[in-house]
Amino acid sequence: MTELEALQKRLEPLFPGLMGVKLVEVSPDRVVATMEVRPDLCTSGGILHGGAYMAFADTLGAVGTVINLPPGARTTTTDSSTKFIAGAPVGSKVTGESTAFHKGRSTMVWQTLVRNEAGKVCAVVTQTQLVMVDR
């Protein structure tokens, strides 16, 4: 099983699995995934809910952090900032690309661009992940 397959399997029983997050590419500096825009992830206007954008992006930054963790360490998000730019309609697919801005010993910062099928940026999410090492 590849690292990508193992990570996808870890996500399946969790909230990202319920949302339908599908990992496409995983490396120490970049994570790419897709998600179908289903009706249950949308607002009453038939566009992807802001919370769904945020949860999608949070997942990608967390995955990027997890693959960079030292043995015995874990992570949690400490803050996240989202700028909403455009909508993604129900029945379409969004793609998220998360890149590392900072990979330190105690924190990692990731920025995720979420794009609609036309390639237009819908949201920009910057998050900080705390790295916790059990001693």
Image: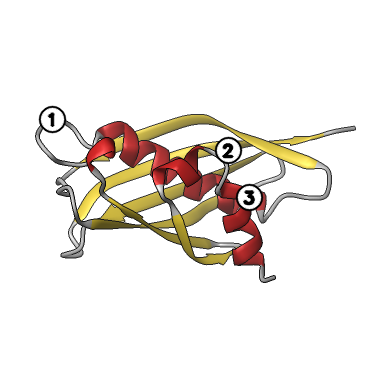
The residue sitting at 28% across, 56% down in the picture is 94
Classify mark 3: residues with Cα within 10 Å, few (<14), some (14-19) or many (20+): few
Q: CA distance from mark 1 to mark 3?
A: 31 Å
Residue 40 or residue 122, whichever sits in front:
40
The residue sitting at 42% across, 59% down in the picture is 33
Which residue matches tag 3? 10
Residue 85 shown left or right of residue 10 in the figure: left
* Residue at far bottom of view: 2
Which of pointers 1 and 3 lies earlier in the amino acid sequence?
3
Splitting the image into 4 quarters, where does residue 62 fall? top right
Any mark on residue 44, and which? 1
Which residue matches tag 2? 129
* Mark 3 residue element: helix
Q: Which residue type does callout 1 highlight?
A: Ser
Splitting the image into 4 quarters, where does residue 87 fall? top left
Where residue 20 sits in the image (x, y, percent)?
Answer: 41, 49
Where residue 2 sits in the image (x, y, percent)?
Answer: 66, 71
Q: CA distance from mark 2 to mark 3?
A: 19 Å
